[in-house]
Image (tube, helix red, strand yellow):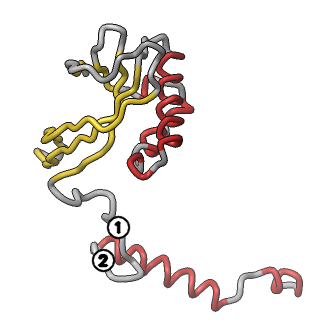
Amino acid sequence: MDDTTRRDRVPVAGRVFAIVLLVTLIWFGWNKVEHWPFTGWRLYSNVKGNTAGSFFPFRIDADGALHRVDFTEMPDAYSRAPYLLEKFERYSDAQREAVCDAIAEGERGEGRDVEAIHVYWERYRVRIIEGERVKDRIEREFRWSCAEAPGYDGPPDAVVEG
């Protein structure tokens, strides 16, 4: 082996460390051992509690009916929009209005009629049934009306469709 090849090789200590680390990670994962710093193997795979709550936007059409905004039916640029709603109540009025305006613009861009956007707080009971996550709505509470079209008279007592 020439001198150049010898200098280009990873030192023995580095190779031993990498092998020990990989074997340790595999062993902890295989045996489901959750000790620091090897924690979080199941961080997002288990239900954290039996209830969950979030803000959900609904559009109001010209007939006053509420329709849940389905971000999967909107352009890809809206795919992260639900994360903006996680801290919706902490935003200033101007920030909330900007989020609602963007949602309304996306809905209108898809050809849907939007008189306003209503934001509701919904809480669900979460259960695992036969390995599937099942949500039962416990409550829905109106919080904000925004992105209102000119002439919109305010939140009606509408029936939710979808």
Element carrying mark 2: loop
Q: Position of residue 50 (x, y in %)?
A: 15, 55
- Residue highlighted by disc 2: 34
| Residue at the spot 25% in from the left edge and 48% down from the top edge | 53
Which one is earlier in the sequence, the residue at label 1 or at label 2?
2
Placement of the N terminus among the 4 image quadrants: bottom right
Q: Is residue 122 above or below residue 102?
A: below
Q: Which residue occupies 22% across, 38% down?
A: 141
Q: Quadrant of the C terminus?
A: top left
Single out the residue that lies furthest toward the top: 63
Give residue 41's mark: 1
Q: Please determine whether, in this image, residue 109 is positioned above or below residue 103.
A: above
Residue 58 in the image, given as x and y percentages of width and height: 34, 27
Question: Quarter of the image holding residue 2?
Answer: bottom right
Q: Residue shown at 32%/25% (left/top)?
A: 68
Tag 2: amino acid = Glu
Q: Circle 2: is it few (<14), some (14-19), or many (20+) Cα within 10 Å?
A: few
Residue 9: give x, y in percent of width and height.
Answer: 76, 81
Q: Is residue 12 left or right of residue 9?
A: left
Q: How far across and how far down the image is residue 59, in percent? A: 37, 22
Q: Residue at x 72, y 82 (%)?
A: 10
Q: CA distance from mark 1 to mark 2?
A: 7 Å
Q: Nearer the viewer, residue 1 or 88?
A: 88
The answer to whether the residues at label 1 and label 2 have Cβ atoms under 8 Å apart is yes
Query: Is 10 situated left or right of 41 in this image?
Result: right
Q: Nearer the viewer, residue 140 or 5?
A: 140
Amino acid carrying label 1: it is Trp
